[in-house]
Amino acid sequence: MKEQSQQLFRAIEDERQTHLLAYVTSDRPLPFQAKMALDVIPRFYEHLTRMKEVGKIDLFLFSLGGDTIVPWRLVNLIRECAREFSVLVPYKAHSAATLVALGADEIVIGPMGELSPIDPSISTPFNPPHPNEPKEPKIEIGVEDVGGFINLARETVGITDQDNLVRMMEKLSEHIHPLAIGAVYRSHALIRLLAGKLLALHMREPTDTQRIPKIVDDLAEKLYYHNYLISRNEAEELGLRVVRPSASLERLLWELYLSYEAEMDLGQPFDPLTYLGEGESAELEKPIALIESRGLRSTICKRVRIQRMPTPPGQPPGPQIAVQEQVVAWKTAEVSEE
């Protein structure tokens, strides 16, 4: 797999006359789920310092998103090293990954490419617990869900007087801690600030800068549903600088995605019984995120142990499975280009 991706790297760089980086995070469910996180920044620096005489950098990107501060830090780091910066989107580049794309001079999107709204979900110690499973992680709060509740009361129901608005907020705070609501406001303001700053890195002409507020409004608020998927046609309509790849580049980008899909089981559900088979236990290790450039690869893995357990007394018969997981820290190693 590594050799195949390196061959594709060479072909893409030759066609684009650029230096190529790839950043992939797993879109699988837990325990193999991964999100964009700030720990990638030092790893990217390792890759960038090996590149010499960099004029253009392309970032091949596949991710469902993650920490909203990562795009600002990552884009600025890459721009420290290159005069031109493009993002290549063969498939999924959602949420925080869409924010990264906003910071690029151009977004090269294939026919399967997907961007998404940038409204975040927040997790704080004050988030509400899961109503049916208290031991499960607390419920994430969608920033636009809180805004939607308020807009529903004002615009649809027609509540405008101050007393009723106060009662409405009191009702909301019965279910969501006031400090979590405060975090929602701050997250909403931050995402708009970051989107505007990322677009302003390359949209400097007066006609371009006038379009920035509308692009931010559309991506942060006007699509109404966090899982809404933005095709390249709609990305163009939103005013983003979209480039359609040539047939040969489109094929290369999709082949590179497929090589990562095969290596990381991207898009696959997690069924422990599949790995367990007829045995009593099984161990496996899979990369959950990687960064790659010509001759160098960084990976972070998840090691999982699956154990068949006896059925507790009083429980109906059926498979009882315990899953233990351990993160294996980032490792960077040279890879053969042959």
Image (cartoon, helix red, strand yellow):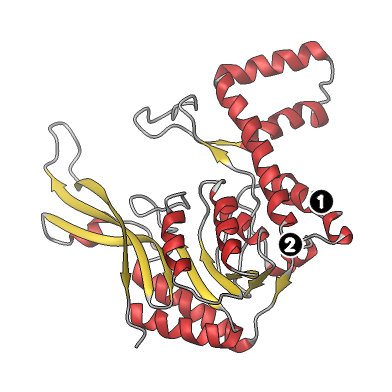
* Residue appearing at x 37%, y 34% in the figure: 136
Above-or-below relation of 231 to 294: above
Above-or-below relation of 214 to 52: above
* Numbered mark located on residue 202 in the image: 2
Above-or-below relation of 73 to 106: above
Q: Earlier in the sequence, mark 2 or mark 1?
A: 2
- Please provide percent x and percent y for residue 289: 39, 60
* Numbered mark located on residue 143 in the image: none
Q: Within the image, what quadrant is residue 315 found in?
A: top left
Q: Disc 2 vs disc 1: which is toward the camera?
A: 2
Q: Label 1: which residue?
A: 214
**Distance Cα–Cα, label 2 vs label 1:** 16 Å
Question: Quick check: can you spot residue 173?
Answer: yes
Secondary structure state at the residue bearing disc 2: loop
Q: Residue furthest right?
A: 207
Which residue type does callout 1 highlight? Answer: Lys
Above-or-below relation of 67 to 111: above
- Please provide percent x and percent y for residue 39: 42, 51
- Please provide percent x and percent y for residue 282: 16, 58
Secondary structure state at the residue bearing disc 1: helix
State left or right for residue 133 relative to residue 318: right
Q: Residue furthest front?
A: 53
* Residue appearing at x 78%, y 10% in the figure: 163
Which residue type does callout 2 highlight? Answer: His
* Residue appearing at x 80%, y 60% in the figure: 204
Q: Nearer the viewer, residue 51 or 207?
A: 51
Q: Within the image, what quadrant is residue 291 found in?
A: bottom left
* Residue appearing at x 72%, y 56% in the figure: 199
